[in-house]
Image (tube, helix red, strand yellow):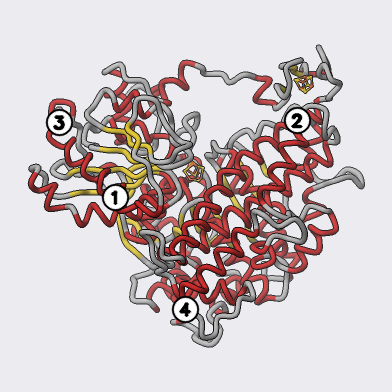
Amino acid sequence: HNHTQRISLDHDFEVLYEKACEAGIETAFSRAKQTPVPCPFGSAGVCCRHCLEGPCRIGFNGKGPQEGICGANGDTIVARNLLTMMIEGAAGHAEHGRETALALLEASEGNSDYQIKGVEKLYQVAAGLGIETNGKAVEDIGKQVALKALEDFQKQAGAMNWLTLHAQQQSIDKWDELGITPVNVHLEISKAVTRTSMGCDADPVNLLLGCLTMGLVDGFGGLHLSSDLQDILFGVPKLVKSNFRLGVIKKEMVNIAVHGHVPLLSEKIVEWSRKLSEEAKAAGAAGINVVGICCSGNEVLMRHGIPAASSFSSQELVIVTGMLEAMVVDVQCIMPGIQKVAECYHTEIITTLPYVNIAGSTHVDFHTDKADKAAQDIVRKAIANFPKREHQKITSFTGTVEAYAGFSNEQIIEALSALNKEDPLKPLLDAIASGAIRGVAAIVGCTNVREFQDWGNVTVAKELLKNNVLVVATGCSAHSLAKHNLMNMQGLEYCGESLRGVLKAIGQAVGLESLPPTLHMGSCVDNSRPADLLTAVANRLGVEVKDLPAVGSCPETHSPKALVIGTYFLANGVDVHVGVNPQVSGSQFVTDVLCNGAKDDGLNLEKLFGGKLIYEKDPVKAAAILLRRIEEKRLALGLSS
Ligand code: NFS
Ligand code: SF4
């Protein structure tokens, strides 16, 4: 094996990468190798193209121009570019939330192919929003909750409903004082786009405060709102066992990959691939097999145990198996490159949203009132493609890795209740207090074509587990951990002894040999779940989230969405590690505010909120820093050392 060919810790993808290279099929990995060094100006965040006088860029080390044509200096340009990325990330999650809110409204009005399945969650959210539920029909309550959600895209004063629903009061007070509390999602996004445009906000401090507002927009209007409403529509995830790696693609089956984020469509694909399996048999297949990619994959894994084929960076390579009849996509993280790869095989790329098309692919328009029809069309297209397979082009894999998932907070609390019915959080708190668990880490975010796939995610996790940190995971990093045995019992060997003891005690209380070493909490919008878990723990202890020995780590991020999720956690005082350059190094000022302790009375994340951004490429070093931060917070809380 040629070392320069190494792209992934998952050997199957290396086999497919070599196959693609030999066949002359381009993928993100080969394209990345064609531009080995990213543009240094963009990498440092000092390139501005906000108007047609530019693009302008700031020279390095004081050499060359230090201001753009308009007079914007490096600090302003870097802060403004960072805010632009935040806007992009938050907008995606907010659209996800808004579409889910509309879907709930339509389901409540009976004008839809969806029904409310998570009735208990509906009551709980309604109560939190102050909606009277007594004597009301489920649909009635559903409609009121949906309208409350849509208010978060319309109201012109006050704070977002979902922020008040989920945040700690101390945090809200702090955000109010700083003037960063978001009023409504669209208003804030629109305002932020305006302030980043040429000739508007030129104060890097104010721009960075704008980044925090976007973090809150994302956290509440994107993550929490989406997870809550999805739980209401589709049910709260429960413990489930499934499989990862390319062996989940079955040679004898019609294989359909669901890819993207909003589970409205993928839920229906799962349903209809079960209902239409006889048609697949008539076409000569053994049945229909749905596999997941990225966060759509996480959603259907969490609720239906659908196996997962790939995280973000290797999405094109899944097609190179030659066994995918269709890849159905909705929104976000869908590489345009999939179409060209699909054209080398019989695979049909099917787009479904009016604002996400890929030239050359098939488009099946999807809306909630004709979701069943769209899903049937899509599944039938896949079945029709089955006989078109080119058998000499098939590479099949047998290896799969078992993984547990479905760890919603409700599921975690249920498991803990088996140990202490009256006070379910107590066993967890006791374990943290005694030091059996040093702290909690959420490993989140992506895989990135420029990184050695899975390496950062897996290494940070193993280092933390070894040191008795409870690890939860979401998004594509959950794929990395699952593929490498960190979500099944084999991986328990990576845990420190005291952590292993706690996992066993809780797991055995619910009839498992143990809890798995890391807990899969869902998709990226489901980062609301670890946030809620921390809030519950902090409330129970009578402290703030910022005081907890808790950290977030995003070792292989690629997406602005991950950056803005991180910013949401930063606004709550949680330290956030990123293993990929956040593109702010062109401004020492911005770097100091985000990453370094305060030098003066100016804006400083750690001083204001209690956590900071940690940029460290080396996953072993990163874990060491995170462990140090956990111990610092334990000390401040007076917990045993
Ligand atoms: Ni999150 Fe999920 Fe994956 Fe990254 Fe993309 S799919 S929303 S952004 S790459 S984790
Ligand atoms: Fe240049 Fe200013 Fe225009 Fe940016 S906004 S491109 S720095 S003139």
**Mark 3 or mark 1, which is nearer the start of the sequence?**
1
Circle 2 sits on which residue?
197
Q: Residue furthest bottom?
A: 422
Residue 312 position, x and y percent, is 43, 38
Circle 4 sits on which residue?
137
Residue 47 position, x and y percent, is 71, 22
Spatial separation of the CA atoms under disc 4 and disc 1: 28 Å
Spatial separation of the CA atoms under disc 2 and disc 1: 43 Å
- Which label belongs to residue 388? 3
**Label 3 packing within 10 angstroms: few (<14), some (14-19), many (20+):** few
**Mark 1 or mark 2, which is nearer the start of the sequence?**
2
Spatial separation of the CA atoms under disc 4 and disc 3: 49 Å
- Residue sitting nearer the eye, 419 or 258: 258
**Mark 1 or mark 4, which is nearer the start of the sequence?**
4
**Mark 3 or mark 4, which is nearer the start of the sequence?**
4
Circle 1 sits on which residue?
373
Give the SS element for disc 1.
helix
What kind of residue is marked 2?
Ser
For the residues carrying marks 4 and 3, which lies nearer the camera in this image?
4
- Residue sitting nearer the eye, 587 or 401: 587
* Residue 634 in view, yes or no: no
Identify the residue at horizontal 67%, vertical 54% (top origin): 154
What kind of residue is marked 1?
Lys
Give the SS element for disc 3.
helix
